[in-house]
Amino acid sequence: MRRYELAAVCETKGHIFQLFWIFIIGCVLGDIIETIYCFVVTGGTVMNRSSVLYGPFSIVWGAGAVLITVFAIILNRIRFDTRSVRGRIIIFITGGIIGGIHEYVASCVTELLTGAVHWNYSDMAYNISGRTNLLFCFFWGIAALIWVRCLYPYISGFIAAFPWKIAKTATLIAAVFMIIDIYISTCSLIRFTERSKNIPAISRYERFLDEAYPDSLITYIYPDIQIVD
């Protein structure tokens, strides 16, 4: 298989659609990784790790994949040698920092939007306000190294190989689906928080959300969710 340059994602026609598919692939891989991790640490319990109601998509991992990809592109543009030992160490350290900051910000944003905390690392060592911790920063560093050195060059080449017309149509359909999925998921989480505070549904849409996405479903999709007082 031909090895594509790291800058391919931004140097070909339709680079935005390629970054979108990097996001989607990162979402799916992140969901798989977290499911396996939880299965191992809980001794065999299968937990849903998706960020949305429909589909195996971890939004935090998808956005993280985009951030690490942009970082890789910058390194390539300044002709930084990512194959050297020094280069790999820098990728690992920077990836851990980027991942930690990203996870912290994502936790703040989701709490602000939905009124609920979706992960809490307060019981883990070296955590920052329970939103991220040193261990997961280490995991982010490892993930960045694997992504930049092993996965991304081939994935970007695979995406770039699709005919533009087909890729554009598929991207439009997938983007619309993701926007709707994220919107409904966010609204359902907001209503979940409001129900916990005995705030009644006012609009027809809010009543629909209460019926279609009851508390039992929300707590299944988001097993770690905690309402903010």
Image (spheres, helix red, strand yellow):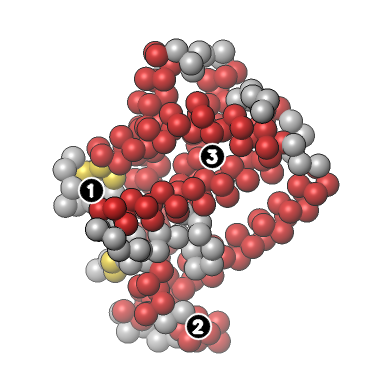
Q: CA distance from mark 1 to mark 2?
A: 34 Å
Q: Residue at x 74, y 31 (%)?
A: 12
Residue, disc 3: 66
Residue, disc 2: 212
| Dot 1: element | loop
Closest to the camera, between mark 1 and mark 2, is 2
Q: Residue at x 62, y 40 (%)?
A: 19
Q: Residue at x 50, y 13 (%)?
A: 81
Q: Is residue 86 above or below residue 164?
A: above
Q: Is residue 107 left or right of residue 30?
A: left
| Dot 3: element | helix
Q: CA distance from mark 2 to mark 3?
A: 32 Å
Question: Residue 178 at what x, y percent from top left?
Answer: 60, 59
Q: Amino acid at mark 3?
A: Val
Q: Is residue 14 left or right of residue 103?
A: right
Question: Residue 163 at what x, y percent from top left?
Answer: 81, 42
In this view, the residue farthest toward the right is 165
Q: Amino acid at mark 2?
A: Ala
Place residue 20 in its image quadrant: top right
The quarter in which the C terminus is drawn is: bottom left
- As drawn, the label of residue 53 is none
Q: Are marks 1 and 2 in contact (CB under 8 Å)?
A: no
Q: Dot 2 surroundings within 10 Å: few (below 14), some, or many (20 or more)?
A: few
Q: Is residue 16 above or below residue 191?
A: above
Which of the marked residues, 1 or 2, is nearer the chain's N terminus? 1
Q: Residue at x 57, y 65 (%)?
A: 181
Which of the marked residues, 3 or 1, is nearer the chain's N terminus? 3
Question: Residue 108 at what x, y percent from top left?
Answer: 35, 52
Residue, disc 1: 129
Q: Is residue 184 left or right of residue 32?
A: right
Q: CA distance from mark 3 to mark 1?
A: 25 Å
